[in-house]
C-alpha cells in the first residue's frame, strides 16, 4: 500500500473535505499520510490528524514528512507525541 497525500493547504476551509478523503483511504487500508506537500496549516490540521488517529485505533497511523510549521503548531498545542 502507498501513502495518502495531504494537500498543500490544510486549514479550516479544507478540513472537512480532507477528512472525508482521508477516511476513505483508511477504509482502503492506508496507514501512512504523507504531509510533505502540506505547507499552509492552522489548528484545524491538528484536529483532523488527531481525529484520523482516533478513527484508525487500535492501529496507529504514521504521519510522514511534516513541515516545520506543522511540528511547531503541534508543539504549541502539546500534541507532538500523539502525532509524530
Image: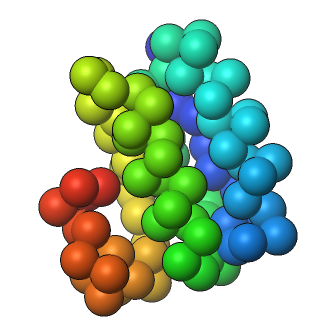
Where 48 sits versus 69, above or below?
A: above
Residue with the most extreme left position? 81
Query: Can residue 48 be seen from the camera position used here?
Result: yes
Residue name at image x 81 percent, y 48 percent: 17
Colouring chosen for the image of the structure:
rainbow
Q: Is 51 positioned to the left or the right of 71 in the image?
A: right
| Count of numbered tags | 0
Where 8 sits versus 72, above or below?
A: above
Q: Is 84 positioned to the left or the right of 55 in the image?
A: left
Residue name at image x 67 percent, y 44 percent: 19
Where residue 74 sits: x, y (%)?
A: 34, 75
Residue name at image x 47 percent, y 66 percent: 46
Where residue 2 sits: x, y (%)?
A: 52, 22
Where residue 76 sits: x, y (%)?
A: 30, 88
Along the viewing direction, whichever of 5 and 11 lies nearer the viewer: 11
Q: Is 58 positioned to the left or the right of 42 in the image?
A: left
**Can you tell which quarter of the image residue 15 is in?**
bottom right
Where residue 10 sits: x, y (%)?
A: 68, 66
Residue name at image x 51 percent, y 62 percent: 47
Q: Is 13 positioned to the left or the right of 8 in the image?
A: right
In the picture, the quarter occupied by the C terminus is bottom left
Query: Can residue 2 be seen from the camera position used here?
Result: no
**Can you tell which quarter of the image residue 75 is in?**
bottom left
Amino acid at each position: 500500500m502507498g501513502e495518502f497525500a495531504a494537500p498543500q493547504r490544510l486549514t479550516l476551509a479544507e478540513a472537512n473535505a480532507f477528512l472525508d478523503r482521508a477516511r476513505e483511504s483508511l477504509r482502503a487500508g492506508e496507514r501512512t499520510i504523507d504531509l510533505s506537500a502540506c505547507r499552509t496549516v492552522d489548528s484545524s490540521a491538528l484536529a483532523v490528524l488527531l481525529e484520523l488517529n482516533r478513527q484508525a485505533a487500535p492501529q496507529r497511523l504514521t504521519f510522514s514528512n511534516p513541515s516545520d510549521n506543522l511540528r511547531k503548531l503541534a508543539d504549541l498545542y502539546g500534541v507532538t507525541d500523539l502525532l509524530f
